[in-house]
Amino acid sequence: MLEAVLTRKNVGVKKGITIKSLVSVGLIVCAVLLPQLVHLIGGAPGGVKWLPMYLPVLVAGCLLGTYWGLGVGILSPVLSFAITSLFGNPMPALERLPFMMTELAVFALVCGLFGKKIDGNKWLAFPAVLIAEISGRTFFVALVAIFQSVSSLSVTMVWQQIQTGFIGLILQALIVPLIIIGLHYLINRGKKSE
């Protein structure tokens, strides 16, 4: 969506990269801080229930497109792990990190595939997020099934966490598209109606 706006406004490549970089950094910061806030308010189970890191990553995919969204999806859990490890309580835990990186990458990738379409029809943010959530969670379960012999995670454990986080997924399937629709309106204010 953002790429289409930058193209429409004839923003140069260098300035476009700067804008996308700043937006990406802002979303990564949100993806690192939001889980800390949720854990502070709701305790450790809050992260599994509300899935706070997912929200900025889903927004990144819809807003920034495939490649930039993918970067946000991969870097968010890595930076969160690195920063929280300094304080002795890494989030996500090391054994979950590769799985979560992959899951968030799929979220961003799927939403990113809808990016240009969302610019033309902002309502497509709803199916984009829903399909991304289903794809990402399915990919997560499949990876755990493949690697459970060498991982402390099991399909049963992950399935229980998916059930616990179902309310968070549903809320994000509503909230993220509304954020995207709001951003669509804000960045397209000057665009004439056709």
Image (spheres, rainbow, N blue to C red):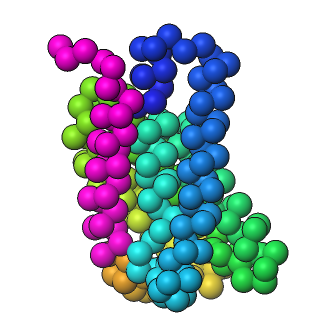
Query: Which residues lie in the magenta part?
Result: 167-194
Rendered image quadrant of residue 163: bottom left
Whether 175 is among the magenta residues is yes
Locate residue 6 relative to residue 83 in the image: left or right.
left
**Along the line of sight, the residue nearer the viewer: 174 or 169:** 174
Residue in view at x 64 percent, y 46 percent: 25
Residue 190 coordinates in the image, percent (x, y): 33, 20
Residue 191 coordinates in the image, percent (x, y): 30, 18
What secondary structure is the stretch in magenta mostly built from? helix
Residue in view at x 46 percent, y 44 percent: 61
Locate residue 91 relative to residue 11 in the image: left or right.
right
Above/below status of 90 relative to 135 = below
**Along the line of sight, the residue nearer the viewer: 145 or 120:** 120
Asked whether the viewer can see residue 134, the reply is no
Whether 143 is among the magenta residues is no
Above/below status of 116 relative to 172 = above
Rendered image quadrant of residue 16: top right
Residue in view at x 30 percent, y 49 percent: 177
Quadrant showing the C terminus:
top left
Locate residue 161 relative to residue 93 in the image: left or right.
left
Asked whether the viewer can see residue 53, the reply is yes
Residue 84 coordinates in the image, percent (x, y): 73, 74
Instruction: Residue at the far top: name it.
Output: 10
Above/below status of 82 relative to 123 = below
Instruction: Residue at the far right: name it.
Output: 86
Quadrant showing the N terminus:
top left
Give the number of callouts: 0
Residue 29 coordinates in the image, percent (x, y): 62, 56
Residue in view at x 72 percent, y 83 percent: 89
Above/below status of 96 relative to 18 = below
